[in-house]
Image (cartoon, rainbow, N blue to C red):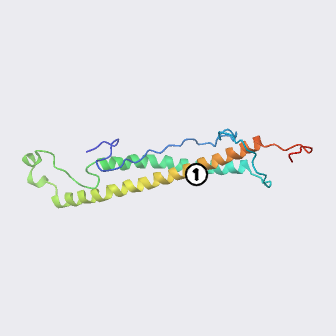
Amino acid sequence: MSTPDQPPAGYASDPQLEMLWTTPPAFTGMAASGSSSSTPPLSESFTVSLASLQSGEQAMLDATSAVVDAYNPVEAQVQSIISGDSFYGQWAEPPGYREVAAPTSMPNDAISQAAQEFAAQMNPVLTRALRSVADSMQAVGIYIAMLNASGQAYTSADQNSAVPAPNDPAS
């Protein structure tokens, strides 16, 4: 039998989820690094609402946080079920049990065997279900980080943009 911290042999451990941040960082334009030596091409004007972008990011962080908060207790409960040996009604005889047990106190071996077979099928299903939730949350977290990076990039572009003077020969 394994402890909840160590999954049984053959199982991939399910990740613990945590939030890297719960409030969007300020758009400072400092996320991008490096510089370009060439002049960027001219483009038409456009507008980005950083407040709307950050509001959407906050809504996604709130929803993700709710999933993470609900996931971790369920993950711990599933690990406890998987590492236990009696949740589904399976029963394993301890050594020397038959020598001291009265015949009427013996478990029904057919029922115990069926429960062990069910546990062997159900435990991997629970693990895959948890992994699906964790993988989905990872994908959402990556999307939120990319959304934040786009806000940082727009802020950096805005801070580093310059309008040439009207008499500048380069215009």
On the rendered structure, is 8 left or right of 96? Answer: right
What residue lies at 47% left-to-right and 45% top-to-bottom? Answer: 17
Q: What residue is shown with label 1?
A: 143
Disc 1 marks a residue whose amino acid type is Tyr
Left/right of residue 43 with respect to residue 86 in the rendered view: right
Where's residue 72, x and y in %? 44, 46
Q: Position of residue 11 (x, y in %)?
A: 33, 50
The answer to which image quadrant residue 22 occupies is: top right
In the displayed image of the protein, which residue is found farthest to the left?
Answer: 99
In the rendered view, does 133 fall on the left or right side of 9? right
Nearest to the observer: residue 15 or residue 84: 15
Q: Nearer the viewer, residue 53 or 35?
A: 35
Rendered view: 103 above or below 170: below
Indicate the secondary structure of the residue bearing disc 1: helix
**Viewer-side residue, 158 vs 43:** 43
Identify the residue at image location x=23%, y=56%: 116
The percent coordinates of residue 41 (x first, y second) are 76, 51
Label tally: 1
What residue lies at 89% left-to-right and 45% top-to-bottom? 169
The N terminus lies in quadrant = top left
